[in-house]
Amino acid sequence: MLSLHSRRAFIGLTAGAAAGLATAGISGTARAAELPRITPLRIRTAAGTFDAVAAGPRHGRKVLLLHGFPEAGIEWEHQLRALAARGYRAVAPDQRGYSPGVRPAGIEAYRLDHAVQDVRAMADALGWGRFDLVGHDWGAAVAWIAAARHARRVRSLTAVSVPHLGAFAEALRTDPVQQEASTYMDVFRQPAPGPENMMLASGPPKLPGVDPAKCAEYFRRLSRPGALTGVLNWYRANDFEGYEQRVAVPTLFIASTKDPMVAPSGVRATKNWVTGPYRLENLDGIGHFIPEEAPDLTSRLLLRHLASVPS
């Protein structure tokens, strides 16, 4: 969920700026050839076929990583490689609206309940009985709900940036700081194609901590017909209310002190919504795009959390 300034400025890169990017991420350095390989993957479900990227041995412990707005599965490039290097099998799908094969018409199709069903459907399609779940931004919102509802399937949860929705919804109701931080959502929720046209006509975004080449790739994908409407329908369909179920699985919440979209009140209150083992890591001086702004630290914290949870 971009800052008000960044999200209003989002998406003005030309598709040509993305030329030369690999399908599975940004490549081209000598060091990239030495790192674990990231490969494209297609996940067929009843809802449609999700595009994804994957890394690590197929027999490894399973980890599903859910991206946020305006990103895609390649947001997790660093974490995918770090997980693969430790023997995990990590998969990062492009969620509904982002995957061309799962881009239903209508706002209601983007309710969080459907995205949570997608998590289970993708795990089933991959043949995963149990798995560790990771999410950032909207992906964190989905992951909080999925971990609460499917505790027999989700071994552990790592949520990045966005608090448990019980805490977040309460902050939206009662905290003027969170209310002000979320005013950009009012713009995104306006009827199509108003916000879409504004974004596609705007100048190049500057997403703090995100490689401009990655921003160009995100823009290229969301410039495709219908893509941006599907993505913005996540905002139009959801008000974050109605998700008060507590999480019982071991949980790591990675937040940050300079996140312009998330007030400290929701971060602090999240502990009240987890009944299992819980750890908060509040990164000093980091903004909203934690996996890309602080990739090494994010990967280290994630790996440490996974290692603390028995297979």
Image: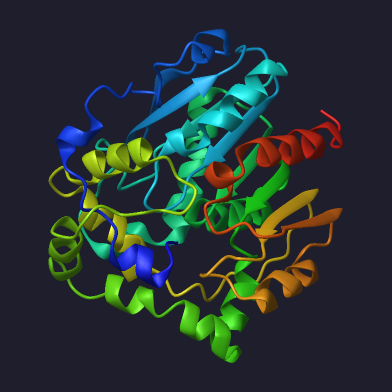
Query: What sort of colour scheme is used for the picture?
Result: rainbow
Name above or below for residue 253 compared with residue 42: below
Name above or below for residue 103 compared with residue 193: above
Residue 4 figure quarter? bottom left
Residue 285 figure quarter? bottom right
Query: Would residue 113 be visible to someone looking at this image?
Result: yes
| Residue drawn 33% across the image and 23% down it | 23
Q: Quadrant of the C terminus?
A: top right
Residue 302 figure quarter? top right
Looking at the image, residue 94 sits to the left or right of residue 120; the answer is left
Return the x and y of residue 207 as percentages of the image width and height. 41, 53
Name above or below for residue 29 compared with residue 264: above
Looking at the image, residue 277 sits to the left or right of residue 303; the answer is right
Return the x and y of residue 165 as percentages of the image width and height. 60, 69
Q: Is 301 in front, or is 190?
A: 301
| Residue drawn 54% across the image and 32% down it | 123
Q: Is 277 in front, or is 266?
A: 266
| Residue drawn 49% across the image and 78% down it | 181
Looking at the image, residue 227 sits to the left or right of residue 46; the answer is left
| Residue drawn 67% across the image and 16% down it | 85
Q: Is 82 in front, or is 60?
A: 82
Return the x and y of residue 259 as percentages of the image width and height. 57, 65
Query: Would residue 153 be visible to someone looking at this image?
Result: no
Return the x and y of residue 98 as percentages of the image width and height. 31, 44
Q: Quadrant of the N terminus?
A: bottom left
Counting the numbered discs, the total is: 0
